[in-house]
Image: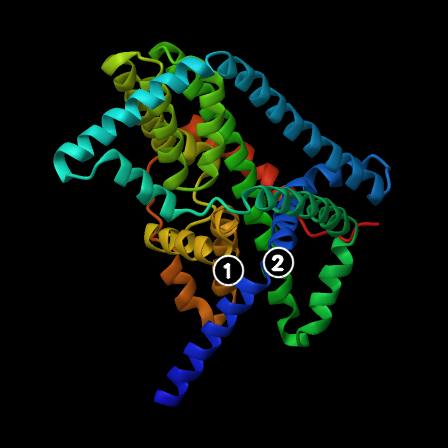
Amino acid sequence: MLNKAVKVLLLFSLIFAGLYYAKPFLFPFTLAAIIAMLLLPLCKRIEGRGFSRPVSAIFGLLVLAGVLAGIVALLIWQMSDIAKDFSQMQGKVSDLIHQLQEFIHSKLGITEQEQKKLLQSSGSSGGSMGKVVSNTLGLAVDFILVVVYIFIFLISRNHLKKFLLKVVPENRKEMTEKIVHDTTLVSYKYLSGLTMMIIMLWILYGIGFSIAGIKNAIFFAILCGILEIIPFVGNLTGTALTVLMAVTQGGGAGLVVGVILTYFVVQFVQSYIIEPLVVGAEVNINPLFTIIALVVGELVWGVAGLVVAIPLLGMLKIVCDNIEELKPYGYLIGEEKKKAPTKPWVDKIKGIFSNKAKNAGESSDDK
């Protein structure tokens, strides 16, 4: 028994070490696979109109690039407005820092000079320019790899699927095909639902922040919506940054209360209206394992791990649910489904997204 436990611990140690050191290869590969699942329905529609698979893949990449370019352009436009008030904001931030230093001095007896020394000793400034250049080049290489991987996944999807079916024994081919189908289906449902939810959050945060009186409300609405990709942590981070902006704008307690009130209202609408209608329980993970996945993802891959942790855990649950020996683990990762009475219009809206996801996940032999 002890020998078996040691082997299991050794296996987990090797897996985590492998994931950590193979991040430069595995993260672009994983992210490309997830995005390819999101683009798959669009590519199938293009192929249905008589276009070749490479053409449909290129069209899907162009659509993705157009969406990303639009978001970046909107953020840059809003940031240019923020830059106009940068000097004023910088002065207010300096005042806030000075007040915080005085508070620490009065309560803890640490002088401002000692506080500066502590900050300088906690982070080394040497080689910072080299790190910026290195990180920028790394991001550029990862971006190119993701684009290449997405293209290859889209044009070679049948080849990869047939490979999996050839690897498994004959008596497990049907089960393997079901796992591939369900994994593609749930990934599309999750990603398309998350995309729709983020767009709705942009609108809700934009309206709320505008009513509260935040300058550049659209920028912070987009920021809070995008950070929603990271459960629990993302929305709190976006709201904290917006509160900080409210303080630097000198709007007083009323502006801060308006931002916090907007956060709670949007979270209520998101939890009880948007998620049940748009996202649903397609990635049916209980909160405990959601947090565990986020923590482990951050430890292994940093911020990148936070982004892909939940979709990967959802795929793992599908695999566990379809393999008899692993079903208890799939049950452990998931949560109990509660049947709640729904109105006809709710079912109709859910049906729209279910039909789209069903079409996306159909595993047909393409040309």
Numbered tag placed on residue 316 in the rendering:
1
Marks 1 and 2: which is nearer the front? 2
Q: Where 195 sits versus 82, above or below?
A: below
For the image, the number of numbered tags is 2
Identify the element where label 2 is drawn.
helix
Spatial CA distance of label 1 from label 2 is 16 Å
Identify the element where label 1 is drawn.
helix
Instruction: Identify the residue shown where x is 59% and y is 21%.
Output: 76
Left of 73 or right of it: where is 105? Answer: left
User: Viewer-proximal residue, 302 or 98?
Assistant: 98
Numbered tag placed on residue 273 in the rendering:
none
In the rendered structure, which amino acid carries the disc numbered 1? Answer: Leu
In the rendered structure, which amino acid carries the disc numbered 2? Answer: Leu
Q: Point out the image quarter for the N terminus.
A: bottom left
The image position of residue 251, as x and y in percent, is 30, 11
The image position of residue 288, as x and y in percent, is 32, 54
Q: Which residue is the site of mark 2?
A: 26
User: Viewer-proximal residue, 203 or 81?
Assistant: 81
Instruction: Identify the residue shown where x is 48% and y is 62%.
Output: 321
The image position of residue 313, as x and y in percent, is 48, 55
The first of marks 1 and 2 along the sequence is 2
Q: Where 56 sits versus 160, above or below?
A: above
Left of 203 or right of it: where is 142? Answer: right
Instruction: Identify the residue shown where x is 54% and y is 17%.
Output: 78
Instruction: Characterize the local packing of mark 1: few (<14), some (14-19) or many (20 or more) Cα atoms within 10 angstroms.
Output: some
Looking at the image, the residue that sits furthest to the left is: 107
Residue 190 in view, yes or no:
yes
Q: Quadrant of residue 257?
A: top left
Left of 121 or right of it: where is 36? Answer: right
Instruction: Identify the residue shown where x is 34% and y is 12%.
Output: 212
Looking at the image, the residue that sits furthest to the front is: 113
